[in-house]
Structure formats: structure tokens, C-alpha cells
Image (tube, rainbow, N blue to C red):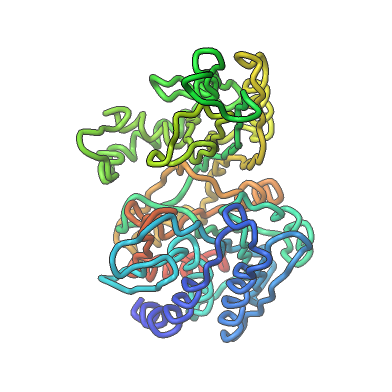
Amino acid sequence: MTDIASRWESDVLPSLSGLIEIPAVSPAYDPQWWEKGHLLAAAEHVRQWIATHDGLTAEVIERPGRTPLLFAEAAGPAEGGTVVIYGHLDKQPPLGDWSEGLGPWQPVVRDGRLYGRGSVDDGYAAYAAVTALTAGRAHARTVLLLETCEESGSVGLEDYLADLADRIGEVSLVICLDSMGLDYERLWMTTSLRGAVQATVTVRILDTPLHSGVASGIVPSSFRIMRQLLDRVEDSATGAVTVPEMNVPIPAIRREEAALLAALQPGVGASFPLTGTARRVSDDDVELLLNSTWRPTLSVIGAAGMPAPEVAGAVLRSATTLRLSFRTPPGVSAEAAAGALTKILTTDVPYGATVEVSDLMLIDGWDAPAPAPWLTAALDEIGSQVFGKPNATVGVGGGIPFIGMLAERFPAAQFVVTGAVGPDSNMHALDEFLNLPYAYRLTEAIALLLAVHAQS
């Protein structure tokens, strides 16, 4: 462990800090990504670092119109199947003003934390994987897949997987380092991931805006029509999403898992920065866990057509646009859900208003298969040797499209979905950081897992 920590400090942190400095914003948030070249620069930056390590090769692959993919390979026996380790290099946008002394493209090490956008989501993954592979333990042939479109739904990744199928080979183990845990004291295993349906919805009632003193009461508000449409898909009193195609029965084993997790970590969401007297939607920790992992939810994540309050005039606006983000449970077809959503929002629209549903982003969820005996034993050993505590399992409310893609392509593979994100890591938010001591232990855990896999 001491060796891995020293290698992180001498070898990893300088290069990972350089990666943070690259504003490699995911294409959904940067339409000029190709012209700016930041995604390619991020992939090339990591490729150059990987190339300095014996036993590994790496290349950046580009398909026309798609963001680049970094493909790396570590030699080793392939008789028991190839290991695939996944991470991504694209980042969320800066969001706003970070705390004093911090910034999205400014790597800062402070109190055992590495701050900067992409530090924990998910720039560290490539570095942890390579450090684990070169830690001196045995490992099977291993492939690293580092994409640059994860934050935008992994558009084009399936095409890359098809192109690289022969080079990847038969996969027996998938390790994903893009997930999260609820503390920094143990190894957290993700057992399910929600999918997503994102859509931009525009309600248009006028060709041009009109004075509100003249038109209101005669022409309906586009915002009021939008409210009525949202009532068709969400119960505004409870937050329950009512689209049938977005709901599935919750498996008994996942209910049991939620109960165990609630007992281990009581106070779900207690660390969230609720303001004033604001409270959670329920006091039942089990139901909160199921809400965030196995029930669909709706978040309005963007709006257009509304001026800032300080410059808003007395105008009946011609249109209202919202960006809707549905999180959907495993087992839901994102394509079918999007089709149902579009039909609900565009059929029998109040007052005959025009409704457009566009810019769809679709991700299917994933439910983990039962672990093989060798994997269960390996995880138990990791918990004892590396963390001094048993590992824990958790369903995650976010999505990782790659997992579902590989699960479909390699149904016999074992999956270890984990990561360095903790409850306060601020991924996607201001002041994102990587907990360095935890990253060191996670790297050691991956090295041990690779060694046990090579012997299984």
C-alpha cells in the first residue's frame, strides 16, 4: 500500500493534475467540442502517460463525427478471458463560481483532496487502473476503454465496441471505476444503475410575444400549458412518475439490500445541503433508497424562453422550453419510455398549442448478475486486507451506459462496478474533488482483484 501511495504522489498526481487543466467538457454541453479539440487533447494526454509504463500500449481511436476513444492494452494470459477496465475522460461543465482558491480547471491538493473538474468523475480511473496493473501482481490480459462521451450518454460507444470486438476478445471480467459509495471506509459495489430519458420540451402558443396587459386572459400562458403537461407524467404532490413505461416491479432482493443499507447507513441524504427548514421527501430511509435507485424520478434541469427576473417585462411570452431529465429503473427500455413520453406530451394538447419534443438522450439501466464464487471470495479478501471492513453493496441512481452495452455483449462476464466518488465528492457540482487516501486504497483493491482473477 505504501508503494501505491508513493507512486500516486510521484507518478499519478502530476499527470492527473494536467488532465484537470484541460477543459474537456462533454459534447452535450459544448457544441464546438470538435473545433476546440479539448476531448482529443485529454485522450492524448492520458495516452502519453500510459505509454511511459512498461507492458502497456495505448492509442487514440477516432470515428468520423464521434468523440475519441482511448484504447489501451496490458499484456497477460488470455486463457481465462480478457479483463476490461472502463473509465471516461469527458467532464461536466464548470457550473458556476467555485470556492475561493479553487476552480474547475485548476488542480489543487488540499487536506488529502485533489480538487478540479474531472478529478473524481472520472479522470482518476485511468490512473488507478494503470497503477494497479503495474503494481507487481499477476493479471490476465487487460484492456482499458476510456471514452470521451459518457456525460452525454456515450453516443457512438456501441460502434466503437463493434469495431474493437476482435481486439477486445472474450471478456470474463469487467471493472468499472465510474461509480460511487456512501463513505470512504470500505469498498462499495454497485448492484444496479438507473437509466435516463432526457428531452427538451417546447410549448408554443404565439408566433410573437404580446403585451401581457393586452393578451393575458385571452391567450393562455405557455407556462400554464407546460404545467398541465407535466401533470400528465408526474404527480406534483408526491413526485411519482406516472408514465407506465417508466415503472417496473422492484425485485425482492433489491428491497432487502435497501433495508440492509439503511441499517448500515441511517439518515439517507442527511449530508445534503438542504436549506433552512427544507426536508427530505420521506423519513423512511428504505423508501428513500428505493426512490433513488428503483423508482423513476423527474428533474427539470434547464429552461429557455424566460428572461432573467431583473429584465423581465410585462410580456406574455410566445413559448416555454424545459429540459426534462427522467431517471428510470433497470428493466425499462429508454426507447420505449421516450416514445410513450412523446405521445403523452403531444396528444390532445390544451388549447391546441404546439408541442415539440427534441434532443433526446436515452440510457438503459442495469441490474447486476449474481457474483461467481471466486469473485465473492476475492471481494471478501479485499475488504479484510485493504479496508479492514466488509465490502457493501448499493444501488446507484445514476447511469453508466457502457455497463449495459457490455453486459449485453458479454452476458457471461462478471461485473465489478465501483468507484472513488463519495457522498461529498461534488461530482457534477461545484468544488468537485477526489479523496486521495481512498483512491490509493481503491487502486490496491483493483490490483488484488486482478491477481485473484488471474488465478481463478
Q: Please, is residue 55 above or below residue 248 in the view?
A: below
Could you say which quadrant of the image residue 222 lies in?
top right
Q: Please, is residue 47 above or below residue 351 in the view?
A: below
Viewer-closest of 12 and 355: 355
Whether residue 266 is visible, yes or no, is no
Q: Residue at x 57, y 68 (%)?
A: 454
Could you say which quadrant of the image residue 46 lies in?
bottom right
Decide if residue 120 is on the left or right side of residue 401: left
Decide if residue 79 is on the left or right side of residue 297: right
Viewer-closest of 263 and 184: 184
Residue 116 coordinates in the image, percent (x, y): 41, 67
Residue 417 coordinates in the image, percent (x, y): 51, 53
Q: Residue at x 61, y 42 (%)?
A: 363
Whether residue 111 is visible, yes or no, is yes
Q: How many numbered discs sit on the rendered protein?
A: 0
Q: Please, is residue 360 above or below residue 181 in the view?
A: above
Residue 262 coordinates in the image, percent (x, y): 31, 37
Viewer-closest of 140 and 406: 406
- Quadrant that contains the N terminus: bottom left
Q: Residue at x 63, y 25 (%)?
A: 206
Could you say which quadrant of the image residue 142 lies in?
bottom right
- Quadrant that contains the C terminus: bottom right
Residue 152 coordinates in the image, percent (x, y): 60, 51
Q: Residue at x 56, y 67 (%)?
A: 455
